[in-house]
Amino acid sequence: MFLDEWQHVFRTKGLLKIILGILLVPTFYAVIFLASLWDPYGNVKHLPVGVVNNDTTIIKSHHKYQLGKQLTTNLTKSQTADFKTVTPAQATRDLRTGRLYMVITIPKNFSQRATQLGHRDFKPITFNDHTNAGFSFIAMKMTTTTAEKVQASVNAQLTTSYLQVLSKALTGTGNQLLAADKVLTKTTAGLNHVTTSETQLATASQSLSNHEKAVATGLTQLANGSQQAITGEQLITKNDQQLQKLLTTQTTNYPQLIASITAQHQRLTQALASPNPTIAQLKLINSQLTQTINHLQTLSTSTQSAQLLLNTNTSTAKQLITANTQAQAGITSLNTGTTQLRQAATTIANHETQVAQGTDLVQQTNAKLATGLKAGGNQLTSTAASTPAQLKTLVAPVKLAHTDTTHVKNNGTGMTPYLMSVALFVGCITFNIIYDMFTPHRRPRNAFDWWCEKIPFFLIFAFLAASIMYGLLLWINRLTPLQPLKTWAFCVLTIWTFGSIVTFFNLVLGKTGAWLMLIFMIIQLGGSAGTYPIQLSNHFFQVIHPYLPMSISIDAFRSTLSIGNSILPEALIFGALILGFNLLMLLTFALNMSKAKQLSYDQ
């Protein structure tokens, strides 16, 4: 009963060719499709990208800058993509016709703006990248990634150049600091201290000047008083001499005047006593009296002169007393000024000491500052002396160290689980559409006999189809699975599972069942997460994802090809599905036994 179906195939003309063609459907689908996208990311270097250089040459500091031309040359020599130098008109035309997938336009002020890097008013330089996603969205994504790499490269080059200039500036600054270390003579703190001491010295000097003025005033007063005393003494001496003469004269004339007055008094008494004084006698007495009166007047005048001299001497003595008082005050002021001068001199000496201390502080601080400047200069020069490796580290201080728990060689290896599952499902649908799995070629004795005639034939066909597909993937596509035997075994298990499901619906619903399986396959294409993570799909596919047969097969193939996880859960699920759907097919055969008996058979 197991060979009846094979005998029918070999007896029927042309059927074997059809079976052989169907046998290769999974192979064609998987091997050819995977070969077309086996390593697209490794062939990005063949992706045509245009470069339009609008940059203008500039001359700055006697140096010519052609950064746009240099960048264009570097891009055309690189293997990042197939860069081509084009004109703006050609770029627009080729981008519209699909000859180019991207056009990168270098702005006309690129060199000018690049040399201004680090200035306060510097703004980012804009590179325009034009794509045409209508020809290939994936190519647009790839070229966009390429443009980002170009941007990163240009940024790194400009930053490196800027850091080199900055390094030279830092080196110059460090050398200047080292030079300042040798000639530094003043510091802020020391100068402030010296300034304070000088201010105090100036105040002391001003005080000394004021005290010198007080001493000068005292000396002037003393000189005036001494002069007045000398003048007064001279005047008193002179007056004393005059008074002495007057007194001598009066002393000499006074007895004579007394004698004269006494004689004249006696004569006048005698004349008056005479009964008949003569006129001559009276005239003589009168003349003598007149003389006496004149002598008295003279004496009175002398007395007045003496009194005047006495008064003058008294006044002069008072002036002498006043002068002496002033001299005494001048001496006191002089003593006070002298004391203050001594104090001021002491203060000046103290301030000079402070100035000396401040100078010492300036020298000490200068030494410390010089040491700091020297250390800072050495640090700046050592920091500025950057090697190319250090500059590279400064430009990209963060390095991304990528590690992967599994190794997937290329895009084709990553896509193999998905495309093998699709190919095996397509092979099952194709087989059930073309080959009749319902009609027996001999009268079955029972449902199991009917099942034994049909299903083993399909299982052998599926085994061969899966084995051929897997073998050609290893040979043509150079697939290198982590677990080769498990991968081959699960290929067989997967096609048996898919075949059991598709054959059951084909037996129950006929061509409609095959159509439903085609729809079911399309749903699985969206919900099995074969190309993108399921988290990127909509909610419907996320809900049905765990229950789809292709989701289970893709997970198992990923484990055997790259990850190395156990596939026992997936194998148990597929074993249960095979058993369940074959029991359902056995039930279907049992329900259709009456139809089988009505058919005509060659045997």
Image (spheres, helix red, strand yellow):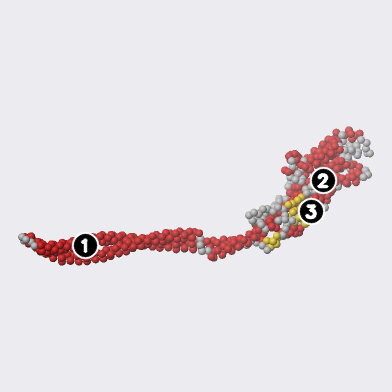
Q: Amino acid at mark 3?
A: Ala
The reply to whether residue 95 is in sight is yes
Nearer the observer: mark 1 or 2; the answer is: 1
Is residue 552 found left or right of 346 in the rendered image?
right
- N-terminal-most mark, 1 or 2: 1
- N-terminal-most mark, 3 or 1: 3
Residue 578 x, y percent position in the rendering: 80, 40
The answer to which of 231 and 10 lies nearer the viewer is 231
Residue 563 x, y percent position in the rendering: 73, 49
Is residue 354 found left or right of 485 in the rendered image?
left
In the rendered image, which residue does mark 3 sit on? Answer: 89
Q: Local crowd at mark 2 within 10 Å, few (<14), some, or many (≥20)?
A: many
Task: Please say if the residues under marks 3 and 2 sit with CB atoms less than 8 Å apart.
Answer: no
Q: Amino acid at mark 1?
A: Ser
Quadrant of the rendered image containing residue 109: bottom right
C-alpha span from label 3 to label 1: 139 Å
Q: Residue at the location (80% across, 52% down)?
A: 94
In the structure shown, which secondary structural element does the residue marked by tag 1 occupy? Answer: helix
In the rendered image, which residue does mark 2 sit on? Answer: 423
The answer to which of 170 and 63 lies nearer the viewer is 63
The reply to whether residue 382 is in sight is no
